[in-house]
Image (cartoon, rainbow, N blue to C red):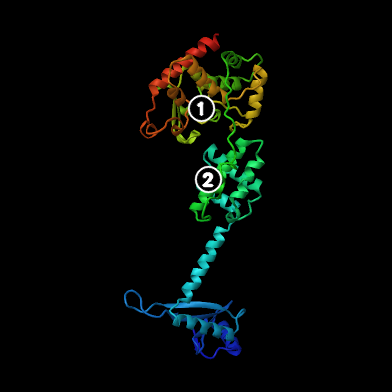
């Protein structure tokens, strides 16, 4: 690699370019001022080598640094020499120009990273949160729809304010439950952005209680014994798989989404138990439900293999059930119960159990697999982790006897 000491000017540069093409290797020109020009096959860049003044912690001189000043396209030799003089002045003042430029570049990179669009951040949030459960998919859906409704998907996080987030309540004034889901999901998304240092503070926390979406009134509907009879034996013909699934929901107070995804691998006939892993439940907690003969009969396990669903309600091969509105309409049409909602069956279970039996509400509620923190208060939530399987089985036995006596044969 030839190193040529000379006063760098246009003629010297043209000569170096010709020499580089002949030798097919880099040529370096060194100016008396210390300015250096590295001539390569496709570019020629100005450089300056220097050492920071003083010594390091061990008493040794600082290592030599190379500062790239620019190239011959954007900087003339005269401009390059002036830049070298400025660098020399900075070094005399104890500064480290190369480190300063690296710091500025890193800061610019961080600023660009922070100012990515919310849509790009949402993609990172999706990777971090995961989409392995229905709850997480719904969480991401609410964030995406909420930001789209605010017109902020392509905006950086810094433009979001608490005043802007108030709009969610106005947008969903007729659907407060949806607004509340949107607001909560966006707030948790902003918590993630705070952790990633894209925001200094979650703007959702600046929204006062007055402007936050109000919770929708709690549902209070449940079915009477007469209505349960109508659900168990519809007055019009109902699809056999729909009827089997409906009867299972009456017997077992599972969530509709949990019951529809049951597979034979969740059923343990020897122990007469139904087991769900943490990933299969809404509250991310494993759950065990005692199974009685009426539930086992509705499962109809002999017709299914381990990989298939116990209730293949969708007509599209092995696809999960998505036509829940059609399912509800079919039940309403064949039973005559116009207000039918599958979730009300869980409320019916707790209401009739509390009204007609002597079991404690905590044991009855435990069969709904609610989050323990929501149903246990104080010290109990930290120390009480018993499954109460024996008591749960007694409850389920009573419930099945009650259904047999009052509903099935009533």
Using the rendered image of the protein, determine whether residue 369 is visible from the camera's viewpoint: yes
Q: Residues within 10 Å of mark 2 (few under 14, many from 20)?
A: some
Image height check: is 386 above or below 23? Answer: above
Q: Looking at the image, which is closer to me, 10 or 330?
A: 330
Residue 218 on image: x %, y %: 57, 29
Of tags 2 and 1, which is closer to the observer?
A: 2
- Residue at the left extreme, as displayed: 58
Question: Is residue 188 toward the left or the right of residue 145 in the image?
Answer: left
Residue 276 on image: x %, y %: 46, 30
Residue 115 on image: x %, y %: 58, 58
Using the rendered image of the protein, determine whether residue 25 is visible from the camera's viewpoint: no
Question: Is residue 188 toward the left or the right of residue 149 in the image?
Answer: left
Question: Is residue 326 toward the left or the right of residue 122 in the image?
Answer: right
Q: Quadrant of residue 16?
A: bottom right
Disc 2: which residue: 188
Q: Secondary structure at mark 2?
A: helix
Question: Is residue 250 toward the left or the right of residue 327 in the image?
Answer: left
Residue 380 on image: x %, y %: 38, 31
Q: How many numbered marks, from 0 up?
A: 2
Q: Looking at the image, which is closer to me, 293 or 115?
A: 115
Image height check: is 236 above or below 319? Answer: above
Disc 1: which residue: 305
Q: Residues within 10 Å of mark 1 (few under 14, many from 20)?
A: few
């Amino acid at each position: 690699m030839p190193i040529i000491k000379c006063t760098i000017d246009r003629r010297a540069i043209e000569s170096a370019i010709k020499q580089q093409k002949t030798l097919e290797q880099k040529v370096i020109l060194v100016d008396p001022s210390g300015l250096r020009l590295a001539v390569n096959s496709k570019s020629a860049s100005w450089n300056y080598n220097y050492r920071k003044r003083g010594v390091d912690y061990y008493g040794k001189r600082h290592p030599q640094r190379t500062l790239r000043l620019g190239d011959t396209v954007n900087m003339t030799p005269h401009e390059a020499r002036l830049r070298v003089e400025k660098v020399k002045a900075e070094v005399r003042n104890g500064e480290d120009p190369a480190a300063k430029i690296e710091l500025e570049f890193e800061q610019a990179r961080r600023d660009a990273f922070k100012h990515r669009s919310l849509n790009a951040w949402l993609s990172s949030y999706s990777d971090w949160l995961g989409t392995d459960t229905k709850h997480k998919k719904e969480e991401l859906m609410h964030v995406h729809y909420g930001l789209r409704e605010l017109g902020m998907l392509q905006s950086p996080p810094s433009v979001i304010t608490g005043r802007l987030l108030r709009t969610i309540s106005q947008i969903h004034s007729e659907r407060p439950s949806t607004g509340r889901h949107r607001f909560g999901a966006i707030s948790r998304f902003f918590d993630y952005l705070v952790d990633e240092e894209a925001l200094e503070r979650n703007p959702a926390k600046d929204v006062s209680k007055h402007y936050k979406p109000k919770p929708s009134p709690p549902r209070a509907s449940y079915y009477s014994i007469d209505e349960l009879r109508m659900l168990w034996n519809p007055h019009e013909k109902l699809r056999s798989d729909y009827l089997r699934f409906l009867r299972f929901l009456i017997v077992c107070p599972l969530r509709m989404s949990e019951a529809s995804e049951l597979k034979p691998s969740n059923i343990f006939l020897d122990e007469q138990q139904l087991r769900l892993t943490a990933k299969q439940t809404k509250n991310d907690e494993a759950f065990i439900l005692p199974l009685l003969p009426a539930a086992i009969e509705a499962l109809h396990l002999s017709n299914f293999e381990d990989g298939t669903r116990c209730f293949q309600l969708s007509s599209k091969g092995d696809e999960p059930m998505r036509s829940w509105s059609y399912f509800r309409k079919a039940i309403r049409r064949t039973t005559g119960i116009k207000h039918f909602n599958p979730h009300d069956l869980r409320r019916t279970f707790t209401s009739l159990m509390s009204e007609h039996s002597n079991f404690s509400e905590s044991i009855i509620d435990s069969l709904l697999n609610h989050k323990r923190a929501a149903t246990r208060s104080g010290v109990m939530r930290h120390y009480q982790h018993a499954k109460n399987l024996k008591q749960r089985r007694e409850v389920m036995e009573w419930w099945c006897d009650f259904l047999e006596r009052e509903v099935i044969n009533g």
